[in-house]
Image (cartoon, rainbow, N blue to C red):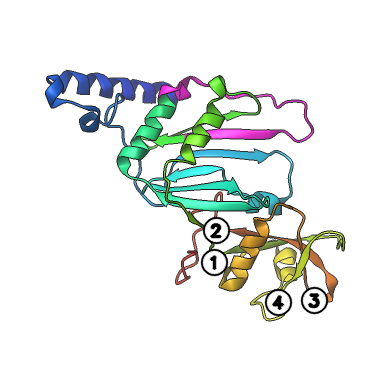
Amino acid sequence: MRRLLLGIVLVMLAFTLAACGGDDNDSSDQDTGGTLGLFEWDHAADAVVVRLDSRPNQESPAFLLNSIPPCTVWGDGRVVWVSREAAGEEAVLEARIDDATLRGFVEDIINRGFYDWEDELLPPTSSDPIVETMTISLYDEVHTVRRYTLWPQKAFTQVLAQCQTLSDTPVRVEPKAGWISAYPVPQDNQVPNWDWPLNAPFTLAELAENGEARWLEGDLATLVWRSAREDRGDIQVVERGGEAYQVAIAVPGYSRDAAAPPEQAAPAE
């Protein structure tokens, strides 16, 4: 029903603007916001307008918390996306785009048939299927399409490539704060590891025992972020006494569903 209502709204806007546009000299895509008219979105910095996500169904909590959606466009025009460096590590990048660019990007997705696509309800027979999702939020209505395998006209791959190239002036994300959580694992000397500092404001054992995340600021938070971006997902952090943990960091404005910073906290960037 939501999809039908949104479709009707978009069609009505298009017809209304076409009827009121006058002659060719008085109307243009710039005036009407494109072929779909002046559709709107929430311009708040924490509002997701477009998100392309990809995540496995079966993974550790630390892996899922550390992973960043492949591309997200926020209401204020901030774009956050990931890419792979030559050495295999993941780079998280961000940039700003103007309203016209954002509007054109959303319009392109809609014109591809976004609101006609159906969810793929049954996962494939692989042992660890990856679900890909595409989300658009307009007029306070959030619509998400979920698929495991093929998308119509390879849309996910094409839209993702477009999302990751909306700006040619990205900067690398190196957060200085975030929510830290820890998960105990059997110590394995064959995998990469590093030591949790003795002067850290809390121990990993505290986090694991209480099943909580705590806000951390400074160089240690950046170190956790960089460790999470390594090509290997099995890096261990070793604490006093030899206990080993997988450590995760969730950063507001970058990670999925990260809680807002505590009051009086320093910004993540």
Residue occupied by mark 3: 240
Q: Is residue 19 depicted above or below 220 in this figure? A: above
Type of amino acid at the residue the image marks with label 2: Val
Disc 4 residue type (three-letter): Pro
Viewed as shown, does residue 190 lie left or right of 9?
right
Q: Nearer the N terminus, badge 2 or badge 3? A: 3
Residue under label 2: 251
Residue 218 location, x and y as percent?
56, 73
Q: Earlier in the sequence, mark 2 or mark 4?
A: 4
- Whether residue 118 appears in this view of the structure is no
Q: Disc 1 versus disc 4: distance between alpha carbons?
A: 16 Å
Q: Nearer the viewer, residue 205 or 83?
A: 83
> Which residue lies under the disc numbered 1?
177
Dot 3 amino acid type: Arg
Would you say the residues marked 1 and 2 are in contact, meaning their CB atoms lie under 8 Å apart? yes
Residue linked to disc 4? 197
| Distance from Cα at disc 3 to Cα at disc 4 | 9 Å
